[in-house]
Structure formats: C-alpha cells, structure tokens
Image (cartoon, rainbow, N blue to C red):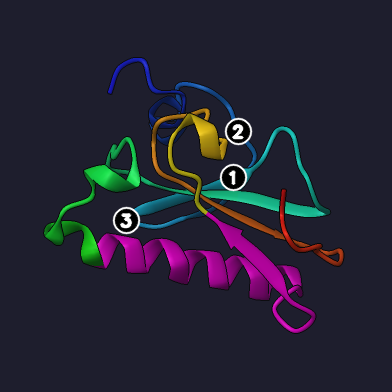
Amino acid sequence: MSDCLFCKIVEKKIPARIVHEDADTVAFEDVNPQAPTHVLVVPRKHVATMMDLGPDDDALVGKLFRAGAAIAKARGIDGPGYRVVMNHNRDAGQSVFHIHLHVMGGRRMGWPPG
C-alpha cells in the first residue's frame, strides 16, 4: 500500500533500525519504546487489521510469532519473560494500519496493561 508507513519500511523507502528480516517478516526497533526491548514485527504483505486476515494468512501469523520468539531469545528476554501485543483498531491503540506484533521485555510488566 503506497501510503502505509510500515510498507515503506519493509520496502526500505524509510529508514528503520531493522533487527530481523526473512522472506515473510521484517522486525525493527519501535521509535517510541515502552520497554528496554520494544521491537515491531510486521509481515511483508500488507494486511491492515486482524479482521483483514484470511485463512490463507494462517501460516503468516505463525511466522510473525516465531520471528518475535527468535528476537526475544536473541535479546535474552525469553527466560525472564516478555510481552507480545497486537492492537486492533484505534480504541485499542492501533495507529499504523498494517498488522504488527509489539515484542516488549527487559522490565517487569504490569497487569492490567492499561
């Protein structure tokens, strides 16, 4: 999608601190981190919201989570624990309409998240 910020990052039209790339996903540091580790994992394919996912995207969702787990392990937060969040629509905090996982750790997380 031509006006999507994350598509532009995936296409390397906008710089980002990329920490992981594979055939289906790209992960980069969040520009406004909420924890010592705060990485966004996005699919290369543009999907605006979770409601836009179809049955053909099941493997893609699994790849997002596997990339998130690999990043957590590489950052050493897999043992102590980390949080994975996907927001859906504005009231939940989604500000970029390209699905993405927030992988956050390196500090104790509170509950409820707010």
Compared across the picture, whether 108 is left or right of 55 comes to right
Occupied quadrant, residue 32: top right
The residues bearing labels 3 and 2 have C-alpha atoms spaced at a distance of 18 Å
Taking 11 as reference, is 28 left or right?
Answer: right
Q: Amino acid at mark 3?
A: Ala
Q: Marks 1 and 2: CB-CB under 8 Å?
A: yes
Counting from the top left corner in percent of width and height, residue 91 is at: 52, 33
Most extreme residue toward the left, as rendered?
A: 56
Q: Amino acid at mark 1?
A: Phe
Instruction: Give x and y (percent) for residue 6.
Output: 45, 31
Can you give x and y, in whole percent of width and height, for residue 22 in the image?
Answer: 39, 57
The CA distance from mark 1 to mark 3 is: 15 Å
Q: Which residue is mark 3?
A: 23
Above-or-below relation of 58 to 95: below
The reply to whether the C-beta atoms of the residues labelled 3 and 2 are less than 8 Å apart is no
The magenta stretch is 59-85
Q: Is residue 76 left or right of residue 39?
A: right
Residue under label 2:
16
Q: Which element type, helix, strand or loop, lies under badge 1?
A: strand
How far apart, in angstroms, are the residues tagged by discs 1 and 2? 6 Å
Say which residue appears at 46% left-offset and 46% top-offset: 100
Q: Which label sits on residue 67?
A: none
Which one is in front, 64 or 91? 91
The residue pinned by badge 1 equals: 28
Name the front one of labels 1 and 3. Answer: 1
* Position of residue 108 in the picture relative to residue 27 (left or right): right
Q: Mainly helix, strand or loop, the magenta region?
A: helix
